[in-house]
Amino acid sequence: MADPNLILVGVNHKTTPVEIREKLAFSPGEIEASLERLINQPEIVENIILSTCNRVEIYARVRNTSEGVGLLKQFICDYHNISPQELETYFYSYQDEAAVEHLFRVSSSLDSMVLGEAQILGQVKDAYSMARALQSTGMVLNQLFEKAFNVAKRVREETGISERGVSISSAAVELARKIFDDLENRSVMLVGTGEMAELAAKHLISYGVKTVYVASRTYERAVSLAKTLNGAALDFDMFKEELHRADIVITSTAAPTFIIKKDMVERAIHQRKNKPIFFIDIAVPRDIEPEVNDLENVYLYDIDDLQGVVTANMHEREKEAENAIEIIQSEVNKFNNWVVSLDAVPTIVEMRKRAETIRQKEVEKALKKMEHLSEEDKNTVELATQSIINKILHKPTINLKKQTQSQEGHVYLKAIRHLFHLDD
Amino acid sequence: MGKLVFNISLFSYLGASLGYFVYLVYRKQLVSTLATATVGLGLLAHTAWLGLRSMETGHGPYTTTFEIAMFFSWMIVVVYFLTEWKYKIKDLGAFVIPLAFLALLFSAFLSKEAALDSETQHFWLTMHRTLSVLGYAAFTIAFAAAIMYLIQEHQVKSKKLGIMYFRMPSLEVLDKLVDKVITIGFPLFTLGFMTGPLWKAKMDQPFLSWDITKTWPLVIVWIIYGSLFFGRLFAGVRGKKAAQGAILGFVMMIITYFMHV
């Protein structure tokens, strides 16, 4: 492929400890200043700076790749007043295809600390729009980043990389949805007002849970949490009587013994005509007797169970990442083809220009020897030679355009340039 | 000709069964689309075959055990298509289409002899057999949904969340599906069950000339689905119990069929 001279220099959470990363981070204001400083360097054609808590990366299109890499490293060191020797071991740099692949991996969240997290895409988008607003990007980086967003979308839609919850509360919501399907109009009861319980409840509410009951030994706390969650406070002694009203029960009290027992749940289920109840016990020591899980239509998960689900989900995401890599590979190829196709056009133009120059020269020479020809005849000679050129170059032009879409496009371009002596 | 058409439907169902399984495990959209298209092709061939057979014999395909197996398989696919269209549960195909395939495969081993004409030209026979087979097909869907429910229920209960946990619908959806198909299938089956004696009566046989050894398993099938039907309405029979009931009913239904062969 004709090299787009694309480079990337950066550090991330895998290569660099946080003590160093935090020194290298760029605030939005600093990014703006830096983009402008970099774009004013003659060596740099386009550039974008991505700075998050887990990575600092500069993407650039340069005139010469190895000089460009050195320049970007130097810039980061100078900007943050750190000696290049100190940073050398932390930096990674990629060129062309590898840089494209890296960006696609980053935007698709394959390079993230939590595989498949959604935040990074937004951060890449922000970095791009900031650079675009300052006009530090051009055709290649624009196309590259727009493509990176598409790739991220494809990965999210076609693989399960962000499907499975990897936090306690998202795993709990997922389970609730596998039991009840739609959480719209379901009810949740909080017994105890622990922070994690509150978080899980908020998560459930965001999925449509409408009715919230809160019970706590300290009634005031129940009232205040109920207020934040737009629910109703229950007297602590009352919650056992009201258990049958809840589809989902989250316990997080500091009680030293089980406060929800099997017979209690048995009664509630009976009152509910066997409609299922999902118990989430995030208290330590546990609040709910484990035997409750033996009851039909009752599902009980304690904190360790949920942790186990989270670990399993993490493994699943890792498996899905392999499918994502396939998608990324094919998109990297597509992007390369695009870059290559860009270069076919100037070659074709040059090739035709070369032929046209020769034609004009030769026709001029010939016509000088044929002064007797009428204007009309001269015109015919002119048209005939033009037509010969067009006919001869027609197929090569078509084929070159076609071939530059393929993997070997660069070979054809090189051959044409060599055969027609275009690079003298 | 008939043989070719039969084989097309048989192999379509086999191919689609595999396709649905691949989709269940690997989630390739293309495979799912292909599987559905293959079932469609199989159903077309199957329908054509039933048409040919009816033209040949001069009556509907429900008089011999061979015809009933063919008809049953056809009805399963038809009801499956309606269910998929209504509920959009693609994974159901992996559990239902193999059953349609097995029924069709089984029919290939039965005698293709047509029944005597005098016994077959009755409106009540058509009603009796069509409604019964429709009911059986609905119960087959209930059976498949019940199997899915039990797999899913086991995973959530045992906290071992395998690949099926993510692939398969929620317990609520599966339980509702079991309920829906039984709610529709049971009245149809009951009507089919009741029109049987009417046909016998038209045949100038005593109204209740039941062969008790042949009829009692059918009564048990009726009782099982009846308990599920009324149990859900009045006693909150649902979830695991309902799924187990649907499986028991299906097994009893198959036994009944074999007692009639």
Image (spheres, rainbow, N blue to C red):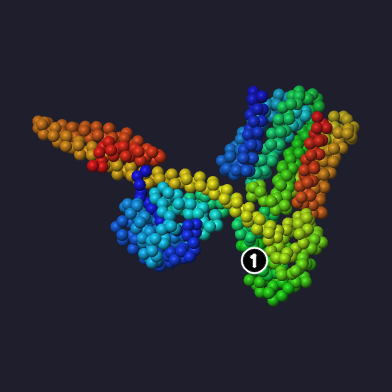
Q: In terms of image quadrants, where is residue A333? A: top left
Please tell me whether mark 1 sits on a helix, a strand or a loop: helix
- Which residue in the structure is indicated by mark 1? A196
**In the image, what residue occupies the spot 64% across and 40% down?**
B21
Residue A254's spot in the image, x, y percent?
71, 70
**Visible in this render: residue A132?**
no
Side of B257 where B156 appears, left or right: left
Quick one: label 1, few (<14), some, or many (20+) residues within 10 Å? Answer: some
Residue B229's spot in the image, x, y percent?
79, 48
Chain at tag 1: A
**Visible in this render: residue A165?**
yes
Q: Nearer the viewer, residue B142 or A162?
A: A162
Q: In terms of image quadrants, where is residue A183? A: bottom right
Residue A218's spot in the image, x, y percent?
71, 75
Is the residue B62 above or below the residue A240 in the image?
above
Side of B187 where B170 appears, left or right: left
**In the image, what residue occupies the spot 35% across and 56% down?**
A70
The residue type indicated by label 1 comes to Met
Q: Residue furthest bottom?
A: A220
